[in-house]
Amino acid sequence: MADNGPFGHVIAFSEHLLDLAAAIREKHAIPGPRPDEVDRFRDKTTMKAIVTQAGIPAPRWFACRSAEQTLADAVSLGFPLIFKPARGASSQGVRKVTSAAELQALCALPALDEHEIEEYVAGDLMHADGVVDAQGAVLFIAVSRYVANCLAFELGEPFGSVIQTDPAVRADGEKFALGCLSALELKSSAFHLEFFDTGSRLVFLEIGARVPGADVSYVIDEVSGVNLFRLWVDVLLGNPPQPHRRTPPESGAWLMIPRPEPLPQRVVSATPLLGRIPFLYRELVPQPGEVLERTEGYATLQGGRFLFRGGTQEQLAAAVSSALDSYRLTAAPVIGAAPPPDGCPSHRQTPHRPEDAWHS
């Protein structure tokens, strides 16, 4: 700063950097959210307390303070329940717990006080993604329904979502999202809100003050012409937002196939789907001989990645289902590779595939 002058902004696109960015702003008097503001969108107990106080349905929860207290609180929640890091992301470290004995074993893990337990909610998991301006007004929002969910992907199931085009579904999702954003007083930010559709009501799960991960933002850009990163930066810099459609006029979807376990695995064969599945416009399929290894996050080479556009939510859901039925990946464990210790992901990284590796 002494050499280049004061910073005007510190912008963090990653969930894991939001706390650091807030601390830097506070230390150097840089405009933008401070740590106490960021807590509303990082600490899952804080965000649920705020939305619950505003009358928005959310899972019952308890912060973990000790093993004895956590086991006692679990009795009031009942089983199954969810055990998760209070400031986690991408469902890393999240567990669905079905018994007191299973929970007792988790309570022996280090840093128990950095976790929470919450009520298990049955229903479809949905997400709303967009950007709000300096006054908290929504500039853009898209509502999607997950195919499986983040936790299921961590456990080895395919993962994706479909943008909703049904006017009633979209209206209900947008109204719910607006209530959550208002209660949390989010301003000048992108957002990724997750909530349950139980069939009778919508229930808050959690929210991030950032652009969504995986391939969500790419599909939104494809079907609406809205680059969420650019729109967010324009808001922060005070630039006039680029003209865009307020809601996507058609559906889009994305699908990720997890890497086979145990890792690492060498790919023997994979089934290209372009030209075979309606609405599929891009794919990233591992090639024979490539080695699939454990990595952090979604934006790396998975067992397969597929992007869809056009049509209605029902047509896109059918296309995703067809892709799941048609795709085949064959791989074999790499002989001689030592597995990482239990609970410790490998630090060997599968390189990001270049842009032209995606087939369109």
Image (cartoon, rainbow, N blue to C red):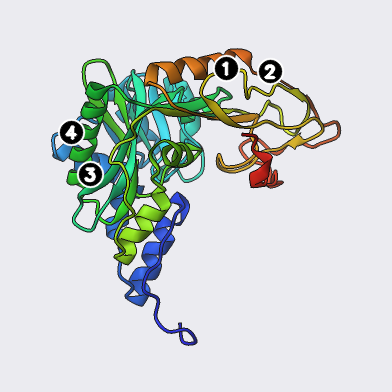
The x and y percentages for residue 290 are 78, 35
Residue positioned 32% across, 44% down in the render: 130
Tell me the distance, in whole angstroms, between the alpha carbons under discs 1 and 2: 9 Å
Which residue position is annotated with label 2?
Answer: 328
Q: Quadrant of the N terminus?
A: bottom left
Which residue position is annotated with label 4?
Answer: 56
Q: Earlier in the sequence, mark 4 or mark 1?
A: 4
Q: Quadrant of the C terminus?
A: top right
Q: Are marks 4 and 1 in contact (CB under 8 Å)?
A: no
Tell me the distance, in whole angstroms, between the alpha carbons under discs 3 and 1: 34 Å
Tell me the distance, in whole angstroms, between the alpha carbons under discs 3 and 2: 41 Å
Which residue position is annotated with label 3?
Answer: 181
Tell me the distance, in whole angstroms, between the alpha carbons under discs 2 and 4: 42 Å
Q: Amino acid at mark 1?
A: Leu
The x and y percentages for residue 184 are 22, 47
In front of the other: 127 or 313: 313
Q: Is residue 289 left or right of residue 205?
A: right
Which residue position is annotated with label 1?
Answer: 324
Q: Residues within 10 Å of mark 2 (few under 14, many from 20)?
A: some
Q: Residues within 10 Å of mark 3 (few under 14, many from 20)?
A: some
